[in-house]
Image (cartoon, rainbow, N blue to C red):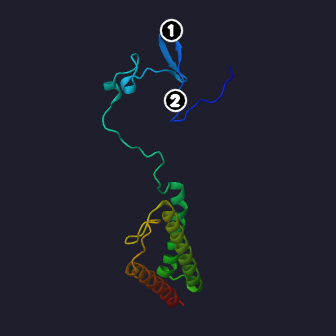
């Protein structure tokens, strides 16, 4: 006899062979146990442990400490570079140091926003990434006005140092 693939077509009749008084199909004995539990296995009561609980196999997306540490470090360094010349007026170079601090702080803020966006966080009032909804123009306008006001005040303060 030659070995070949099994006939798994749903409409085809399986040929049976007789061995003594037990009938065999091409796949094996036709014993169908109720519930799929064998005599030597656990009882159906032992198998049911209560209601099913769905568990997410992927880890939760959140910012890790190694992602946050450089962002927080740059933001702190930039804000201190911006604040000290403004508070203590270091002479002629204070305006340059303050603008450099503002630039470093802004870069760290942008880096932090991009990292937060990558893990799925959004600004309040804006829709989640990939949701298909459009942001409300009033919320976007409020954020633009807020950022513009902070930039104008910072540049104005640094310009007054001279």
Viewer-closest of 15 and 82: 15
Image quadrant where one finds the N terminus: top right
Which residue is at a point 55% across and 76% down the rendered structure image? 101
Which residue is at a point 37% across and 21% down the rendered structure image? 42
Image quadrant where one finds the C terminus: bottom right
* Circle number at residue 13: 2
The image shows residue 135 at horizontal and vertical percentages of 42, 75
Which residue is at a point 37% across and 72% down the rendered structure image? 125
The image shows residue 124 at horizontal and vertical percentages of 38, 70
In primary-sequence order, the first of circles 1 and 2 is 2
Residue that sits furthest to the top in the current view: 20
Viewer-closest of 92 and 41: 41
Alpha carbon distance from label 1 to label 2 = 21 Å
The image shows residue 52 at horizontal and vertical percentages of 34, 39
Viewer-closest of 90 and 60: 60
Q: Could you tell me how many numbered marks the image carries?
A: 2
Label 2 CA crowd tier, 10 Å (few <14, some 14–19, many 20+): few
**The quadrant where residue 66 appears:** bottom right
Q: From the image, tell me which residue sits under label 1.
A: 20
- Vertical comparison of 85 with 46: above or below: below
The image shows residue 129 at horizontal and vertical percentages of 46, 66
Label 1 CA crowd tier, 10 Å (few <14, some 14–19, many 20+): few
Looking at the rendered structure, the secondary structure element under dot 2 is loop
């Amino acid at each position: 006899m030659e070995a070949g693939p099994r006939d798994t077509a749903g409409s085809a009749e399986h040929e049976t062979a007789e061995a003594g008084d037990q009938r065999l199909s091409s796949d094996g004995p036709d014993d169908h146990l109720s519930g799929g539990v064998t005599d030597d296995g656990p009882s159906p009561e032992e198998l049911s442990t209560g209601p099913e609980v769905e568990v997410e196999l992927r880890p939760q997306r959140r910012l890790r400490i190694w992602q946050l540490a450089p962002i927080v470090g740059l933001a702190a360094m930039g804000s201190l570079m911006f604040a000290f010349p403004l508070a203590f007026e270091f002479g002629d170079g204070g305006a340059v140091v303050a603008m450099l601090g503002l630039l470093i702080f802004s870069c760290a803020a942008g880096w932090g926003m991009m990292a937060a966006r990558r893990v799925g966080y959004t600004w309040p009032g804006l829709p989640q990434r990939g949701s298909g909804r459009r942001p409300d123009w009033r919320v976007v306008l409020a954020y633009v006005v807020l950022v513009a006001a902070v930039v104008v005040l910072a540049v104005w303060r640094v310009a007054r140092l001279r």
